Image: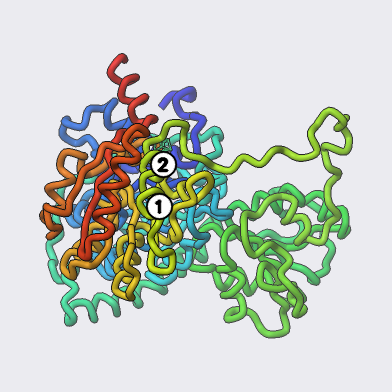
């Protein structure tokens, strides 16, 4: 590879995609979800460029949900080839079953799960830390903190997966996934040849085999721990050479630092001031490969008074330190200050250089706004809550639902909703949904509410969320003929994450719903538009009043999808 070609400016997500390609990728699967979407988008684009039909070329596909994506990747591994699965952190809950059981298999072709966490919930319903899942499944986890590491660690993850015969997790976070930096690339490796498994007992989790496989996974833990202990991303730095720079040694062990992920970068931004304020640098361990490097942690903390942990996400390392270090060493971080007081780092939201600075006990940096003329700046920026696009079909659907529900006894009514652009119907001016929980929950919750005696219950769900997680809940509702209405807002696309294709196009949706057991007499398709709000509301109201299950599809294409479709046609 020429020098010019070997450097590329890549988003963190793109660095993962290129790393996977250069590791000899055969297949990539995923479900869109911010901040992970760009990994598969990049691979789909490369697939189009390379031509998927040619033998040996990799394949990239969106799937119905994260569970089906991971299961497809397991099939690729079964055939001896390498695959990557992409998802956001909450998607990993959906893929939890194949993840936990996949760890018990004899993984053959390397299998990498790229999971992007969203601390601060920029575009998520919850803040959860995927490192807990890796520990739960007892699989290795790599946590890059630069785009270069994202590329290098992705390549390595495939090697590790094949070496230990387990899936390997790559844990990303929003600020890494969506920031761009120069990455030095390596030569692309050949894809694995097709070579299916030979010992089927390694892949068959019947109790007798599963017990043996579980014992085997436990046995592997020693080797995996030794790998993590020796990993160069787990870097122990003495007090004289922290962050690659030489500083005077204080000889003091009052404070030692443990960083991970982007926490390491924010620490380094404050490092010079910290060193100046203390007259020397504290010793520090950065962790980028899990399970935790226990020996390095003990070595770092030998004779220390306080160990301060700076990690992005939940206090994963901090919680585990208590089981590693003696009681005499105070542990500080998000949970406490080590002296019984509140946490030094924020328990919710993202880390940044300023809150890490506070956790280190440094004075705030001078505010840039205080040294420039601020008279011309507004005292605060206007609040801009997220809104549906102007003219979005969901707006007309919500007007319709609002009108149809009006007049029902509020103590006997409920509107549950789901995850997608249409979640914004909870905001003014619509304010229709009363619950948004997780993918598909609208239908299950509506059934429970109807079972409990509420009479006028409507579940609002988008077409792609319905395919992702609503189908099985609708089977339950149909089997019980629950007294509820499901309003499927069908805009023919996965809109919120950038208009990916849905697995079941609009013209096939009704067949699917009928096949699930919904009475065709109570399956109604409405064109959603402003001029039809009154008329549609009457039809919807009739279905809500029906004492069994009804499904009403509100249909109109997403504006953004239409714009992209027209642009693609012109090109
Ligand atoms: S992207 Fe599409 S579905 Fe989402 S708000 Fe805009 S028009 Fe509506």
Q: Position of residue 364 (x, y in %)?
A: 83, 51
Left or right: 569, with 54 as reference point: right
Q: What residue is at 41 percent from the left and 67 percent from the top?
A: 224
Disc 1 vs disc 2: Cβ atoms closer than 8 Å?
yes
Q: Position of residue 560 (x, y in %)?
A: 39, 30
Q: Which mark is residue 51?
A: none
Sequence-first tag of 1 and 2: 1
Which residue is under mark 2?
A: 496
Nearer to us in this view, 232 or 23: 23
Residue 201 spot, x, y in % from top left:
15, 71
Query: From the Cβ of disc 2, is ligand 1 less than 8 Å away?
Result: yes
Considering the image in quadrants, where does the C terminus appear? top left
Nearest the viewer among 518 and 34 is 518
Q: Is residue 30 visible?
A: no
- Residue at the image position 58 percent from the left and 81 percent from the top: 323
Q: Is residue 208 above or below residue 239?
A: below
Crowd around label 1: few <14 · some 14–19 · many ≥20 (10 Å): many
Label 1: which secondary element? loop
- Residue furthest to the top in view is 570
User: Residue drawn at (20%, 40%), measured in percent from left and top?
Assistant: 505
Query: In the depicted view, which residue is nearer to us: 193 or 448?
Result: 448
Left or right of 394? Residue 240 is right
Q: Quadrant of ligand 1?
A: top left
Image quadrant occupied by the N terminus: top left
Q: Label 1 to label 2, Cα distance in Å?
A: 9 Å
Position of residue 346 in the picture relative to residue 502 (left or right): right
Residue 244 visible in the current orientation: yes
Q: Which residue is mark 1?
A: 419
Q: Which image quadrant is residue 40 in?
A: top left
**Residue sticking out furthest to the bottom:** 327
């Amino acid at each position: 590879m020429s020098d010019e070609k070997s450097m590329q400016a890549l988003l963190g997500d793109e660095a993962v995609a290129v790393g996977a390609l250069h590791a000899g990728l055969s297949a990539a699967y995923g479900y869109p979800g911010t901040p992970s979407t760009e990994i598969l988008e990049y691979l789909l684009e490369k697939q189009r460029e390379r031509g998927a039909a040619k033998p040996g070329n990799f394949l990239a596909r969106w799937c119905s949900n994260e569970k089906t994506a991971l299961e497809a990747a397991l099939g690729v591994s079964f055939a001896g080839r390498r695959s990557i699965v992409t998802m956001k952190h909450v998607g990993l809950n959906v893929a939890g079953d194949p993840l936990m059981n996949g760890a018990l298999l004899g993984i053959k072709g390397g299998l990498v799960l790229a999971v992007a966490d969203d601390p601060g919930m920029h575009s998520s319903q919850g803040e959860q830390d995927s490192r807990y899942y890796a520990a739960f499944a007892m699989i290795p986890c790599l946590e890059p903190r630069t785009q270069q590491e994202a590329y290098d660690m992705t390549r390595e993850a495939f090697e590790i997966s094949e070496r230990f015969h387990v899936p390997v997790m790559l844990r990303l976070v929003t600020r890494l996934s969506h920031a761009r930096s120069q990455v030095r690339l390596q030569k692309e490796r050949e894809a694995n040849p097709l070579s299916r498994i030979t010992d089927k007992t390694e892949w068959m989790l019947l109790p007798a085999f599963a017990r043996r496989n579980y014992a085997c996974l436990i046995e592997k833990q020693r080797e995996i721990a030794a790998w993590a202990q020796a990993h160069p991303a787990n870097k122990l730095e003495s007090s004289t050479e922290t962050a690659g720079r030489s500083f005077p040694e204080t000889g003091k062990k009052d404070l030692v630092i443990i960083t991970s992920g982007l926490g390491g970068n924010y620490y380094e931004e404050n490092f010079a001031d910290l060193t100046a304020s203390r007259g020397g640098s504290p010793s520090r361990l950065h962790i980028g490969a899990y399970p935790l490097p226990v020996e390095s942690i003990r070595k770092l903390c030998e004779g220390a008074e306080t160990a301060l942990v700076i990690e992005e996400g939940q206090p994963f390392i901090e919680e585990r330190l208590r089981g590693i270090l003696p009681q005499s060493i105070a542990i500080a971080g998000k949970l406490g200050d080590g002296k019984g007081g509140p946490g030094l780092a924020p328990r919710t939201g993202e880390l940044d250089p300023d809150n890490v600075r506070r956790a280190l006990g440094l004075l705030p940096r001078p505010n840039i706004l205080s040294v420039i003329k601020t008279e011309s700046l507004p005292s605060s920026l206007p609040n801009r809550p997220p809104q549906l696009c102007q003219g979005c079909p969901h707006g007309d659907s919500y007007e319709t639902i609002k009108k149809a529900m009006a007049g029902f006894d509020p103590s006997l009514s409920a509107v549950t909703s789901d995850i997608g652009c249409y979640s914004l119907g909870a905001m003014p001016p619509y304010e229709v949904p009363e619950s948004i929980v997780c993918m598909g929950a609208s239908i299950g919750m509506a059934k429970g509410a109807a079972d409990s005696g509420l009479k006028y219950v409507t579940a609002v769900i988008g077409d792609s969320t319905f395919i992702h997680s609503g189908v099985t809940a609708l089977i339950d509702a149909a089997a019980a003929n629950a007294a509820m209405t499901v309003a499927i807002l069908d805009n023919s696309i996965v809109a919120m994450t950038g208009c990916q294709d849905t697995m079941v196009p609009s013209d096939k949706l009704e067949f699917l719903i009928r096949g699930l057991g919904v009475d065709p007499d109570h399956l109604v398709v409405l064109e959603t538009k402003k001029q039809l709000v009154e008329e549609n509301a009457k039809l919807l109201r009739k279905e809500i009043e029906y004492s069994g299950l009804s499904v009403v599809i509100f249909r109109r294409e997403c504006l953004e999808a239409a714009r992209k479709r027209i642009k693609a046609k012109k090109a």
